[in-house]
Amino acid sequence: MLTNGFSSDYFTSSGTGNAGANNFFGTKCVIMAAETISAVWINFAGSPVSGVNFQAVIYDASHSLLKAQSIVNTTMVQGGNRFELRPPVALPAGTYYVGYIGDTSVSTSVDSSQTNSSWYVSSGTLIPGSPPNPLVGGAASNNALMFAVEFAGGPTSGFLPDNDPANTTIGGGGQTVTCSSTPSGARSVVYMAPQKIYAEVGVGGVPTNSGWCAIGIVSASFPFAYSMNFFQNKMCQVTDSTGVLRGSVSGTGVPFVNGDRIAIAYDCANAYLWFNRNGTGWIGNGGTAGDPVAGTNPISVGTPANWPVSLAAFGDTTISYTLYDTAASQAYVPPTGFTAVAPVSATIMNVTQAAVEEWMPIIQPAMNVTQMAIEEWGPLPSKNTFTMHPFV
């Protein structure tokens, strides 16, 4: 699954909370530009449950008017849960409250360090599938829900163009980001679905001052408005002030130089990360050897299992990064079981009406398709182009 990106609240410290049955709990979210919303992600902290009814909802800045609602999910898994909007909903830039209504008391991940960033309606009468419009009553809450709003469409490769326009320059058709001396950076447009993904990042220069650069995985909860400190809280820092490749902030590392490629192997289901320099010597936790195929000595990124993520690159010195996120652009072979993150395109062969009629005696019994239906459909297009998504 690939999307244009995400927007979310900045989530710093993980705790758990519970809105209770048939209540509403939502957290403020700023969408920086007009977007089409295809889904809402919410992280559940408890054990998997079934036979329940949960629905994600989006209200306006006054937590009153209903702007979007998802389908009702009847099962919840531990970790990230995707609530699909059918159809997707176009929303202008602005502030919204993103949350949920459930008919069962379920534990969700929250950040208790925030102040009045959420809204809670404790009525015990709200029903998933029939969210109130307008939403009435409630009070501000200091707990922030761990959520992410998924954008539909847009580019499916490269860096997002609007992460930090004052301090970053996106070039190379979106594949290259140049950071200034001010802490800055960018994350990829590609949502890496719960699979094992592989990407490469080319380094243009190394830190020469007291700063450092970082390449790694960042969660979809990570906001567009960030500082370098936010970035450290959200992903694994893989280099230090001397340009040394590490598995963590401290420990023995491997030096890299201008022109090197840093390879990233990420297991989304377990939130495990490994990386190497120029295709050799996979490194795991603490800067020591690891093996993504065997799953040994991983770097634990800290995002929940199955939570949507992107690849990100930052620096507080003048440095550039080039993202190679398609198989065709990559210089090295991914480890067994890992796949390039961006989709590939293919073209369906020309299909004529005569060919369809020739095939129908074979496929008709299995599909229960009548000749009348074929004639009603009319001639098929002579050519169709589609996108093959490696993750679903």
Image: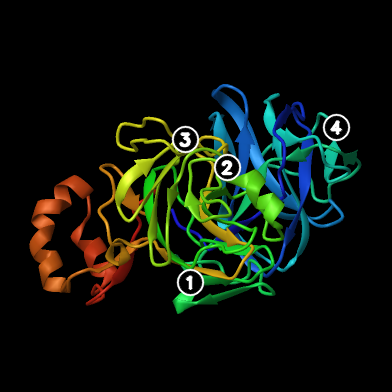
Q: Amino acid at mark 3?
A: Asn
Q: Let me know if residue 69 appears in the view.
A: no
Q: Are marks 3 and 2 in contact (CB under 8 Å)?
A: no
Query: How many tags in the picture?
Result: 4
- State the residue at coordinates (58%, 60%): 314
Q: Is residue 336 left or right of residue 206?
A: left
Kindly report the distance in space between the C-alpha atoms of the residues bearing marks 2 and 4: 43 Å
Give residue 122's mark.
Answer: 4
Q: Answer few, some or many: residues within 10 Å of disc 2's Cα (few below 14, many 20 plus, some between 14 and 19).
A: some
In-front residue for pair 388/310: 310
Give residue 271's mark.
Answer: none
Q: Let me know if residue 348 appears in the view.
A: yes
Kindly report the distance in space between the C-alpha atoms of the residues bearing marks 3 and 2: 10 Å
Q: Is residue 105 above or below residue 388?
A: above
Q: Are marks 3 and 4 in contact (CB under 8 Å)?
A: no
Q: Position of residue 325 (x, y in %)?
A: 38, 61
Which residue is denoted by mark 3 in the rendering?
Answer: 285
Mark 3 or mark 4, earlier in chain: 4
Q: Amino acid at mark 1?
A: Thr
Q: Answer few, some or many: residues within 10 Å of disc 4's Cα (few below 14, many 20 plus, some between 14 and 19).
A: some
- State the residue at coordinates (63%, 40%): 42
Which residue is denoted by mark 1 in the rendering?
Answer: 176
Kindly report the distance in space between the C-alpha atoms of the residues bearing marks 3 and 4: 44 Å
Mark 4 or mark 1, earlier in chain: 4
Give residue 249's mark.
Answer: 2
Kindly report the distance in space between the C-alpha atoms of the residues bearing marks 4 and 1: 48 Å
Mark 2 or mark 4, earlier in chain: 4
In-front residue for pair 333/130: 333
In-front residue for pair 17/132: 17
User: At numbered mark 2, what does the secondary structure look like: helix, strand or loop?
Assistant: loop
